[in-house]
Amino acid sequence: MEVLGIDVGASGMKGAIVDIKKGVLLTERFRIDTPRPATPEAMSKVIKAIVDHFKWNGPVGCGFPSSIKNSIVLTSSNLHSKWVGVNVDELFESVTGLPFIVVNDADAAGIAEINFGAGKGKKGFVLTITVGTGLGSGAFFNGNLIPNFELGQMYYKKYKNIEDYAANSVRKKKDMSFKKWGKRFNKFLDHVELIVCPDLFIIGGGGSKYFDEYEKYLKVKTPVIQAETLNEAGIIGAAYAAKALASVKF
């Protein structure tokens, strides 16, 4: 079963055709910079360009950097404020003529990890944390997604969101050592552990490739492991989210 997966980020929008039975990319990723301003109209054109690049005529799954409820965008995050209130499924379907399932981008990455990566077969309450420009989170109980679990949006001291204190982008911007930043990230995990008591943390996103550099500074009681699907997670999980559409004939 093949599905086109698209991962929408604040800096880039990329896609690939995915084998959703095996959880592997069947093509090279195709990437286009996220337009600025990142309005619905401008980004819809990029979505169509990605679909056209693959000459795709089938279901599409898309990870999107916002909380999404009943297909409605609830937050603009790093995108344009015009996104709030938009039915993103309907918008992308109208532009491409194809059926879309759009989910939160961190949820998409988590879906990949739970079905094909380090979270496969794990029971209980599992949190996947994407460490990148922000701090995304995907919540799963016995393998089932609890959508829009936006833990990176928690307030912390003088910061509007704790991701402004502990995201990987903060480490880069401030040129912090992994020791100093790792202690910050541990505070984030410590808060999450106190509030929701997970059984397992799985660390993904771009910052996960440095996991060995900061693992020693993570002192929470909950086990913390590295993700396995890494940079392909968003595309794979987005495609898998559209699994229900894969039986439709085109």
Image: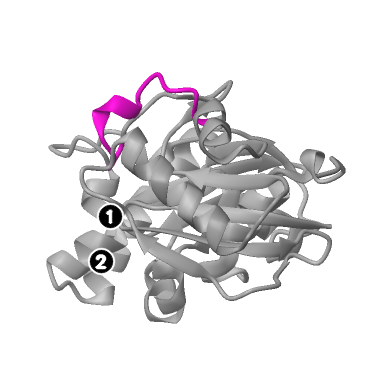
Q: Secondary structure at mark 2?
A: helix
> Is residue 53 found left or right of 60 in the rendered image?
left
> Is residue 117 found left or right of 206 in the rendered image?
right
- Disc 1 and disc 2 in contact, CB within 8 angstroms: yes
Q: Residue at x 65, y 46 (%)?
A: 60
> Residues in magenta?
77-88
Nearer-N-terminus badge (1/2): 1
Q: Is residue 111 visible?
A: no
**Quarter of the image containing the C terminus?**
top right
Q: Which mark is residue 79?
A: none
Q: Secondary structure at mark 1?
A: helix
* Residue type highlighted by circle 2: Trp
> Is residue 228 found left or right of 176 in the rendered image?
right
Q: How much space separates mark 1 and mark 2, taking CA atoms?
A: 7 Å
Q: Residue furthest bottom?
A: 212
Instruction: Give how far across and how far down residue 153 sits, in percent.
Output: 34, 36
Q: Residue at x 54, y 71 (%)?
A: 29
Quickly name the residue at label 2. Answer: 181
Between 154 and 46, which is closer to the camera in this rendering? 46
Q: Residue at x 34, y 35 (%)?
A: 41
**Quarter of the image containing the N terminus?**
bottom right
* Residue type highlighted by circle 1: Ala
Query: With respect to residue 163, does 223 lie above or below?
Result: below
Mark 2 burial class by Cα count in 10 Å: few <14, some 14-19, many 20+:
many
Q: Is residue 250 visible?
A: yes
